Structures are given as structure tokens and as C-alpha cells.
Image (cartoon, rainbow, N blue to C red):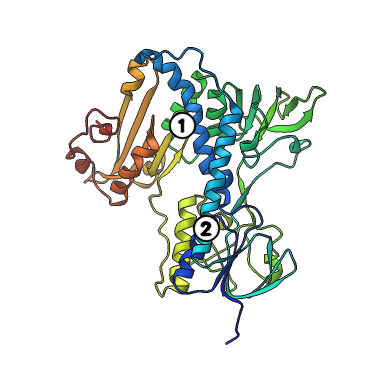
Amino acid sequence: MAEYDYDLFVIGAGSGGVRASRIAASHGARVAIAEEHRVGGTCVIRGCVPKKLLVYGSHFAEDLHDAKRFGWNTEGATFDWNVLRDNVAAEVNRLEGLYGQTLGNNKVETFRERAILTGPNSVQLASGREITATNILIATGAWPSVPEIPGAGHGITSNEVFSLPELPKRAVIAGGGYIANEFAGIFNELGVKVQLVTHGDRVLRSYDDEIVDRLVDISRQKGIDIRFHFSIKAVTKQDDGSLLIEGENGETLETDLLLWAIGRTPNSTGLDLADVGVELGIDGSVKVTDDSRTNIPSIYAVGDVTNRVQLTPIAIREGHAFADSVFGNNPRTVNYDHIPTAVFSNPPIASVGMTEAEARANYDDVKVYKSDFRAMKNVLADRNERALYKMVVAGPDETVIGLHLIGPDSGEILQAAAIAVKAKLTKQDFDDTVALHPSMSEELVLMK
């Protein structure tokens, strides 16, 4: 058997790559990892973590307004974007250091440079060094998509949005997914005039229709201008620095900032995967089997670059399962059923299992239970914003096959409830559970 420099070489130090490296090393493997950007990947550096911190920061706008109804005098309160931006950046730096420390503590050698494949068992670093490994793992994630239209480069993506030198007065957000809706809520609360445009007839297509409709209604009430059937044809930078956006329908918009949030593409370009013979999908995704192996036996891939499910917890589970299978003598795969997800819009959405439409397409005997209510805090704040909880059940036992929430803290509430859906509990099991009063979560066991 040939002797290689490492038992495992990982390209990409994001959530999946770092977890795979750490677990493989814990099983005794000699591991190295290469990262051309910053250790921590999209989620930690330019995604979930800084985004959620901005969500927290933006919510103080409403909290300060509502505080008056609770007896607090907030007169004179002001907002400083530079303070929030810099504090978020400092937290990201801290977390990046911890990720690097974790790799070092587990004796994983880190190369902070780009790596490309040169063979089924070899890579080349940007410095020119050739390295060999028994196994290679591709964990390079995904990258924001930008359309090929005139002037598209005048816009920014989620990669750049966290380091804006100043807040714009006006922003156009192109897209209908979770990134678009989250930043629409963030910018709007921070005082930016927001227009969200999407080429389709709805946003958040994978979520329950009724929940999404509620978000659109509330977003518009909050001042967000949502426009459907708006495809951007071209972008022009004007003399005063503003942007002129031309729609396919002949309509134009003027803005100070254009944020592309139209999806994310598997980040496989320039790795020379095809030259080595690794099979790729039409979208550039690395094709893998259930155990994350490519068509080349020594090469594996996990996370967003495979475009199976683009979620950080999934990348982590895939990386862990890969390491246990290959180096821990514990072959296993990831179960993709009943994955809970959340959109940290304002208000947030959380979902697990089938939507009502999906359930009716797959079952004959579907029932839907709902609770449409105002959170207690909103009542006293005199905020006419209603939460909506939906429970989708099927079969004679009314097995719960879907839960869909919109309202304050939906993500926090759904995590525990998702266990019940995963465990195939019934509506009666929910009914038999005593309500925790007063709380929003008690509505889950009081639905009619």
C-alpha cells in the first residue's frame, strides 16, 4: 500500500470540513486542511452568525418603540451602524480564532491557502507544494449567485453586506429566499427604505403558503415594498453614485444599494475536479452517494458543495458521519427526513415536516389545526401583529407530519417541537401535554 503524507486532506474549513477533520483526527487519522479565505466558513464568517447578530441589533428598533407602553422612557435613543458592524466583526474574529484553535488542539495541520486537486490522492497548494493523502474531502460550500446581466457588478452579495462603510438610505434586495427576506427585515428596522423584488409570484417557496402570506402582509405593513414578477434586466451607476435598476417589464427603480440574494451556487469552480474525473452536476455540485463518496473512491464531499441540503447543521452531520464511517469503523449516513428550518425574518418563520399543500398531495386524510393569535407582548405594546401556528396531521391516528410557525421566537419554539414530529407523535399526544402558561409555545398544545 502506498504511503501518503496524510490519511485525510480536507479542502475547505467551514462547518463540514472542520467537523470532519476534528472527528477523523480523534479516530487517529493524520489530517490536514486547506482554507483560502477564513477558517469557519460561510456560517461563521459571512452567514448565519453575523446575520443573526444583525437581526438582534435591528429588533431593538421595535423594542425601544414598544418599551414606552411598558413604562420606559426611551427619548433620545439613537443608532450607530458603525458600532453594530464593528462589534459583529469582532465577534466573528473571536469565533474564527476558536475554530482555528479547535483544529490545532486536535492536531489538524492547517494550510491557509487555496488547494486544487491534481489526482485521486494528491492536491497542490497555491504556494506550489504538492501533498498526497489516502482520502480527500471536498467541503468548499457554496457561493452567492450573481446574474449575467449588464451592470450586475454594481450590486453586492451577502459576502460584502456585513462590512458596509455606512447604511444606505435606500436598498433594493433581489430574491425571494431566506437571505432576501432576512435582510429586508434587518435593513427596514434600521431605517433603510427597502424594496424586495423577485421574478416569481411568491417568496420562500419551500414554506407553507399561509405562513408566507402572513409574512408578506406583515412585511408590507412594516413598510417593506415587495414586488412580484420583477426581473432585473440591467443595472446602471448614475453620476450621483446611485443605481438605476431596469426591469424586464419596463419599470425602473432607483436605489443606493443593490443586494443580490438570488441563491447560492456550489463552490466547485477552479478546483480541477473534472480534470481528475470527479463527476459534477449541471449546477457544479459534486455528485456523491449516500456515504458522501464521489465516483472516485478516494474522494468524498460534504456540505453545500454537494447541494443536497444547504444548511450548516447538515454539513456538520455529513462531515461527522463521513469521519466516523471512514476512520472510526462506524459506517453511517445522514437522515434527511424532518429537518427543522427557520427564516429569521421579522417576524421569524420556523417549519418542520410537510406543508399543508405537500400533505394534501401525498395523503387522502389530512387535517389542519391552527392558532391565530397576538403574542402577549404585542397586545400590551398595542402592536396589531398576529402570530400563526399550523399543525398538519394525517391518518386515523392524526400523526403530526408538519408544524409551521410565524411569530416571535418561532425558531426557538420549534426546535423542541420538531422532536415530536421526528418521533411521529400524534395530535392527541400534543393535546395530552399540559400547557405552559403564559407562553406562546402553549398554543402548540391548544390548537383546534
Asked if the residue at tag 2 contacts the one at tag 1, i.e. Cβ–Cβ closer than 8 Å, the answer is no
Q: Secondary structure at mark 2?
A: helix
Residue 101: which numbered mark, if any? Answer: 2
**In the depicted structure, whether residue 374 falls above or below residue 96:** above
Question: At which x and y percent is residue 304?
Answer: 55, 54
Residue 404: image x %, image y %? 37, 37
Label located before the other in sequence (1 or 2): 2
**Residue at the image point whose x is 57% and y is 21% from the top:** 191
Above-or-below relation of 372 to 161 = above
SS type, badge 1 = helix
State how many labels appear.
2
Residue 103, how many percent across, how many down? Answer: 52, 61
Identified at 55% across, 44% down, the residue is 92
For the question of whether residue 176 can be seen, the reply is: no
Q: Which residue is mark 1?
A: 212
User: Foreground: 161 or 261?
Assistant: 161
In the rendered image, is residue 306 in sight?
A: yes
Quote the CA–CA distance across marks 1 and 2.
Answer: 41 Å
